Amino acid sequence: MRHRAEWLRQQRFVDWCRTYLEHGVDTHSLTKAALVNALTLAGSAEDAIAAADGIVAAAEATNNPWVLSYALLCYGMAYQNADPQRALAALRRALEVSHDSGNRANESHLAHLLAGLEVRHGDPAAALDYITLAIRNYHDAGSVAFIHTPLASLATLLRRLGRFEPAATIAAFAALNPISVALYPDLHDLIGHLREVLGGEAYEKCARKGQAMTITEILNFAYDQIDQVRAEVNAGSK
């Protein structure tokens, strides 16, 4: 029921964007970029890719770094499954634009998107850097709504490295927030796999632990896992 309600909210986002576009309301091409974002979140991947055509060029024409970083963000989101390398290139450029222009909000969102892609298709060491950047920025800003998403990426990385119990603890916490579920649709599959690997009783024990944690407790737990994984990655590269 909750997933249906979330889909309906995302569909309203799509409808609003289309209504604005029909009425010619598209200052700095932001409405078109927002439509790409809305379609991606609603699960309409092919429509999002089609709508993404031209949004980066339109943003570049504004000479506004915020607009460009947002357009690249939406473009990267649209292609994250269909063409991960294209998405990575767009998001890396967007992160550079955001950082150089002092836009920490978009920088934070881009870091957590890059973290997810690097975990699935790229470099684990880079993923750890992006996860850490996103978590710290969101925590510093008091952004409880978004802090769960980089934690979902961390849980995926921990699962890949065989750290199943901490992965289950962090994934259960991340799944408490519908935003992380919308932005990280693989989260349910991740939890299902962890339940299968650990067994129902062991998984539930880890999940209850994660769900009972405060923000401070889960972040301390996450930072400890990041430090351990980083040490392993660094040792393996020598």
Image (spheres, rainbow, N blue to C red):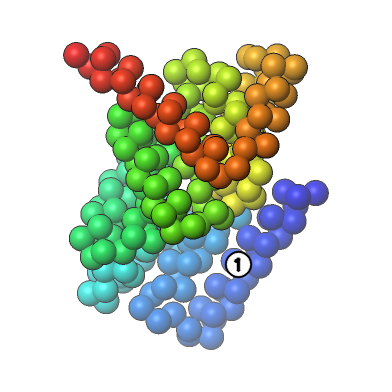
Q: Quadrant of residue 104?
A: bottom left
Above or below, 72 against 32 in this view is above
Above or below, 69 against 62 in this view is above
Where does the image place residue 206, in percent across and percent down from the top left? 65, 24
Relative to the observer, which residue lies in front, 225 or 74? 225
Where does the image place residue 136, in percent across and percent down from the top left? 39, 47
Q: Residue furthest right?
A: 1
Residue occupying image coordinates x 50% and y 18%: 163
Where does the image place residue 40, in percent across and percent down from the top left? 53, 54
Above or below, 158 against 107 in this view is above
Where does the image place residue 49, in percent across and percent down from the top left? 45, 54
* Residue occupied by mark 1: 13
Asked if one can make out residue 186 in the rendered structure from this viewpoint, the answer is: no
**Residue flagged by tag 1: what amino acid is it?**
Phe
The C terminus sits in image quarter? top left
Mark 1 element type: helix
The mark tally for this picture is: 1
Asked if one can make out residue 6 in the rendered structure from this viewpoint, the answer is: yes
Relative to the observer, which residue lies in front, 96 or 105? 105
Residue occupying image coordinates x 23% and y 54%: 96
Q: Residues within 10 Å of mark 1 (few under 14, many from 20)?
A: some
Residue occupying image coordinates x 44% and y 59%: 141
- Apparent side of residue 224 relative to residue 102 in the rendered image (left or right): right
Residue occupying image coordinates x 56% and y 55%: 145
Q: Quadrant of residue 126?
A: top left
